[in-house]
Amino acid sequence: MASLLSSNTNVSSSFVRFSPSSHSQLLPSSLRETLPLPSSVRRRRGPFASRAVLQWNRKPQLAGETPRVVVITSGKGGVGKTTTTANIGLSLARLGFSVVAIDADVGLRNLDLLLGLENRVNYTAVEVLNGDCRLDQALVRDRRWPSLELLCISKPRSKLPLSFGSKAIIWIVDALRSRDAAPGPPDFVLIDCPAGIDAGFITAIAPANEAVLVTTPDITALRDADRVTGLLECDGIKDIKMIVNRIRTDLIRGEDMMSVLDVQEMLGLPLIGVIPEDSEVIKSTNRGHPLVLNQPPALAGLAFEQAAWRLVEQDSMTAVMLEEEPKKRGFFSFFGG
């Protein structure tokens, strides 16, 4: 059995269509008519063939009060939290929203690398709290999309002062919320949460009022994701959405990987994105060039853009089951072969 995805709400929730050979589909039924394939979109090899159309006929409607403070977490390391933060943040900026991305992973920060901003980080949040610089000096603006800013908590391989905790990061978010100087308060504050559920996790989730849980379809990641969901709810974060990363439909069809429906049934969370396994991910990471900027667009990059759209409008998608294609019957099948 494989997984077919459809949106819960109206046509405005999505703007990318996938028509892969695996029959995964990420648009509501009202958009399932055949759309023309732009010449800039080439068919990709592998389990996911791409037929995608971006519809930029309107800007998504921002739901909820701003700034929306979203923590991107998982519990388990290596499932794609930082990749998700970089691509969702840049997608939001491309959609016209102002975004501050906070790398809350102390001593092991990587968000600056994925955004290609590692050489421009001169100050961090620790220096802001110590009075060594202003908050606007620690914010690094992306030159490609100036509405995206990066704030790192500390420098690589440095230890966080004992005084830095939940109150410190709440103060930083409150300072961003009340920022009077241009460009003003951001529409989104994305917090890249460290792995685990220790003090770094508790600090990162403190200012958030919603969360995006990133997981992969394996039992270790799902057990950690379920544990993190409980901790988020205990901390008062009830708006929790899910992104399932590194999906391979060839393994799902061979029953070697759990389907998206299995993951959604296990965790019981609203689904805003399904990211296919894509070799372009590691290439973009090494270049410091987020997937969503690739030309022609990468399949995983298109999926991240869809997830960003749903995050803006607080939309979700639902996984349903799709029957397997019947196996081709050969000549000898007539004789029971």
Image (spheres, rainbow, N blue to C red):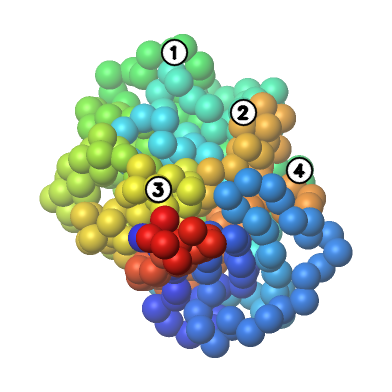
Residue at 43% in and 18% down: 107
Query: Reading the chain from its start, which is encountered first: label 1 or label 3?
Result: 1
Residue at 46% in and 12% down: 157
Name the secondary structure under disc 2.
helix
Q: Which mark is residue 143?
A: 4
Q: Nearer the viewer, residue 172 or 181?
A: 172
Query: Reading the chain from its start, which is encountered first: label 1 or label 2?
Result: 2
Q: Which mark is residue 113?
A: 2
Residue 236 visible in the current orientation: yes
In the image, what residue type sits under mark 4?
Arg
In the image, what residue type sits under mark 1?
Ser
In the image, what residue type sits under mark 3?
Gly
Question: Residue 113's x, y, as percent?
Answer: 61, 28
- How far separated are the C-alphas under marks 3 and 2? 36 Å
Question: Residue 206's x, y, as percent?
Answer: 28, 44
Farthest front residue? Answer: 335
Query: Reading the chain from its start, which is encountered first: label 4 or label 3?
Result: 4
In the image, what residue type sits under mark 2?
Leu
Answer yes or no: do the residues labelled 3 and 2 have beta carbons within 8 Å? no
Task: Determine which residue is flagged by label 1.
Answer: 158
- How far separated are the C-alphas under marks 1 and 2? 17 Å
Query: Reading the chain from its start, which is encountered first: label 4 or label 1?
Result: 4
Count of numbered badges drawn on the protein = 4
Name the secondary structure under disc 4.
loop
- How far separated are the C-alphas under marks 1 and 3? 45 Å
Task: Determine which residue is flagged by label 3.
Answer: 254
Residue at 74% in and 47% down: 294
Q: Nearer the viewer, mark 3 or mark 2?
A: 3
- How far separated are the C-alphas under marks 4 and 3? 45 Å
- How far separated are the C-alphas under marks 2 and 4? 15 Å
